[in-house]
Amino acid sequence: MSSASMPSTLSFWERESFSRLDIAIVGGGIVGMSVAASVIERWPDRQVTIIERSSIPYGASTRNAGFACFGSLTEVAADIQSMGSDNARELLFDRWLGLKITRDRLKQYDIGYNDFGGYEIIDESLSHTIGQIDAINELVEDFIPDYLQILPKDIKLGLRLNSEQQLVSMAQEGQVDTGKLLKSMYTYCSSIGVEFLCGLNVNKIESKEAGASLIVDDAQRGTIEMSANQVVLCTNAFTQLLAPEEQIDPGRGQVLITKPINGLKFRGNLHLDEGFYYLRNVGNRILFGGGRNLDRIGETKTSFDLNDSIQTRLDGMLEGVLELNETPQIDMRWSGIMAFGKTKMPIVRLREDGLLIATKMSGMGIALAGQIGEQLADLMDDKNL
């Protein structure tokens, strides 16, 4: 059979309308959709296409705890020590502004937002951080007034506190329904013209003289080649699969959720141990996650397995933290993959090969996404892309 008679992987129509893209965003999670929204809002005539490997986002975006938060006392204190006050403030501001952008963008949608508040239990071993509250409040007073407050000892909120523990509240903290948030982002992006290609796995991006080539696996068509004038990589913990030069470490987060608990008193978000553990109510259920610090090396992976020792630790901590009338029954367990690096500052940059990167959210993708989208659009504007 001559080459002229060989069947093409794509039809003429598919090649002309679906494989030649203007702006291709690889990764359809909260950051990818936020980038798409910011670009279309600024340049309505641009064609923006999100390429997602799964039918729904597959990473941290749909597998997180749904905290709408900025950082607890011990987490911010640790950030100041590791990054300095200026960088810690910048990161807090970006989280605060990012949530504001997302909530304003989706104000006509139900994202399951509740302003139940955020709290942190300060154990005796971390009591020295109490002395940093005034300095941290002063650092962020222009955008989160009275951010951190020590609560009186008699306020329990349905938590099991001992005499040596103190409870600190974080102002303006809330929670979202992660599923509703992602569905709302999808609906909003679709309404302003963002196109979605789901079920396509991008396994290689090659820089060209004009734009880039994307080698993509399609379950029905096999391997196909697509082209784009500009590619934005928003794959967070999975970034090194396509850009191994980026300094990103995956970090798996273990999560469980209980069945409904009769008489559950606690409402809100609870942070423990510099944010390594996190707990919230979902109606009358409790979602509890964390424990990555128990096996830092073992949890640096991109598989969605469960770590039995961490899950056992979560089970044991659950009743120790909450005042409960009954032993909670576990409904589901799962894991999600976050992205970390030497610092918690996200990566938003244009590489020498022309690839745009928006990644490494350090477990704060919900908070940061709106601002990351704006930063990426600013970068495109500055570079005339």
Image (cartoon, rainbow, N blue to C red):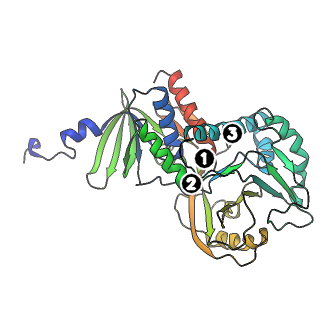
Where does label 1 land, which residue? 366
Q: Nearer the viewer, residue 194 or 316?
A: 194
**Tag 2: amino acid:** Thr
The residue at the point 53 percent across, 21 percent down is: 382
In this rendered view, identify the residue nearer to me: 55 or 187: 187
**How far from the left and from the top, in percent, is residue 336?**
56, 58
Circles 1 and 3 in contact, beta carbons < 8 Å: no
Q: Amino acid at mark 1?
A: Ile
Type of residue at label 3?
Trp
Helix, strand, or loop for circle 3?
helix
Element marked by disc 2: helix
**x, y (%) of residue 181?**
54, 49
Could you say which disc has been placed on residue 96 in the image?
3
Q: Is residue 74 left or right of residue 366?
A: right
The percent position of residue 19, horizontal first and vertical second, equals 29, 39
Query: Pointer 1: residues within 10 angstroms few (<14), some, or many (20+)?
Result: many
- Tell me, yes or no, whether the two marked residues, 1 and 2, touch with CB atoms within 8 Å: yes
The image quarter containing residue 204 is top left
Q: Which residue is mark 2?
A: 178
Q: In the figure, 324 relative to 37: above or below?
A: below
Which tag, 2 or 3, sits closer to the chain's start?
3
Taking 55 as reference, is 168 left or right? right
Give the residue at the far front of this rendering. 108
Spatial separation of the CA atoms under disc 1 and disc 3: 10 Å
Who's the residue at 66% across and 67% down the image?
A: 284
Which is nearer the N-term, disc 1 or disc 3? 3
Q: Secondary structure at mark 1?
A: helix
